Image (cartoon, rainbow, N blue to C red):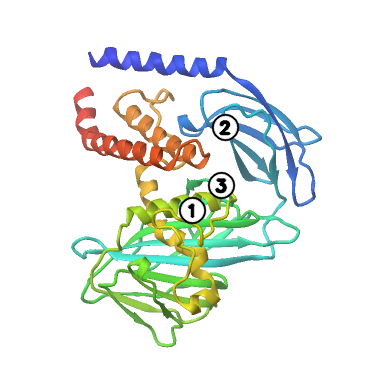
Amino acid sequence: MRIALKNVLGVCAALALLCGFALAEPVTGVVTNKTTNKPSAGDDVVLLQLAQGMQELARTKTDGRGRFSIEVPADGIHLLRVTHDKANYFKPVQPGTQSVDIDVYSASPNVDGVTLDADVMRLESEAGGGSLHVVEHFFVKNDSSPAKTLMSDHPFELYLPPGATVEGLAAKAPNGMAVQQSLVPENEPNKYTILFPIRPGETEFQVTYKLPYSPDKGFEFQPRPTMVTDTLALMMPKSMKFTPGQSAPYSPITDEDLGAQTYVARNVQPSQPLAFTVSGTGQLPRDTGAAGGAQEAGAQAGSGGVVNPNTDTRPGGGLGVPVDNEAAREGWISKYKVWILIALGLAFAVAAGFMLKAPSASKSGETPVGPGGALQALRDEMFSLETDRLGGKLSESEYQELKAAYDLVLKRALGRTSVVEVVTE
């Protein structure tokens, strides 16, 4: 029975793939080097199928005028990847699209105008207080002129606290989608590199990690920014105790909407004393209504849209309006509050597996069709749900209804996977 079902699923998957190719239509486009404002010749153009975990479907090269043509199946959203100067640039292709233009930039290992706009840290204790959970979100700004991409062996470096156990890393290019990355250790203890190109605009990195923790003794952080940082923000539950180190420049931010205590340091220098200690236990609030609104606002901002805090009536909306006058003058809350609220949401997305990540393959190199393959298919559907929402194909109510259903099925599937795999071996 199980074997027959597996064969049927395999045949259906093959037929779906064949049908997709049968309906393929040419998509043309032009790749332009925005550093020189000239067509980019000889760049690799690769078509990726998101529903198969970034599976490559076709490839070509740009001609002397930067033009290309590639066959795209009409079975859902796809992604075009253009490689220029060893840096990748992505553009989604919606069904029915006939033309896609992509901008690239000249890359250099040294680019002026790259700064760390903000480092936002969310801290909370695990249930029971045995470890400390940290989500750290970096906003790297590239205002180079002429615009160039920073690409080297060490494009972005960071320090983590001693004893940190990394749980995940996500990176997001300007106007792009979040993708999983890896931290590369350097020769210096607790220092790492993220091998991800810093394109013109704002690039985001999010690192999630755990630290050994004693609530009574607390944990001392000694942040070590690798470049001048405009804003260093700390968020933690109100039930935890925050103790700044000597000469540390932290100022409290009063904002009841956040449901947490928040401290900020501005214009932080790499050599500046920034130590602080946290103790006690507590978890940050999970306000799903606010988070949902924040995600919608983030999607609009990520796609080039502007969220007007004065007219935003979404649940949890209006988050761009600072509460205290000092923050209004500085402007950091209006820019970063949305991302602070959804930082843990992005970490959960990494854990759920619907970031852009290739699925595990069998020994024969084929995509598995059994329980593991079914689980991957569910995760792919969840990712497709997110992309459909970003593309404006779903209303907020439709998105919330489908996401709730997928979350329930995924939860049940994760609980049963180990048992099912043992039965079918």
Give residue 410's quadrant in the image. top left
Amino acid type, callout 2: Gln
Residue drawn 59% across the image and 19% down it: 24
Q: Quadrant of residue 21?
A: top right
Label 2 close to label 1 by CB (< 8 Å): no
From the viewer's perspective, tell me whether residue 203 is left or right of residue 293: right
Q: Helix or strand or loop: what does disc 1 sit on? A: helix
Instruction: Using the rendered view, name the quadrant where residue 189 is placed.
Output: bottom left
**Mark before the other along the chain sequence, 2 or 1:** 2
Q: Secondary structure at mark 2?
A: loop
- Sequence-earlier tag: 3 or 1: 3
Label 1 amino acid? Ala
Q: Which residue in the structure is indicated by mark 3?
A: 176
- In depth, the one of 216 and 120 nearer the eye is 120
What's the CA distance linking mark 3 and mark 2? Answer: 15 Å
Between residue 178 and residue 41, name the one nearer to us: 178
Q: Residue at the spot x=62%, y=55% of the render?
A: 152
Looking at the rendered image, the disc whose residue lies closer to the viewer, 3 or 2, is 2
The residue at which mark 2 appears reads as 94
Q: Which residue is mark 1?
A: 297
Give the image location of residue 47, x and y in percent. Answer: 59, 31
Give me the C-alpha separation between circle 3 and circle 1. Answer: 15 Å
Q: Is residue 168 visible?
A: no
Q: Are marks 3 and 2 in contact (CB under 8 Å)?
A: no
Q: Quadrant of the N terminus?
A: top left
Q: Residue 399, labelled with which disc?
A: none
- Residue 287 % position (x, y): 32, 57
Q: Secondary structure at mark 3?
A: loop
Work out whether mark 3 precedes mark 2 in sequence or the reverse, and give the earlier one.
2
Q: Is residue 198 left or right of residue 421?
A: right
Residue 229 % position (x, y): 55, 72
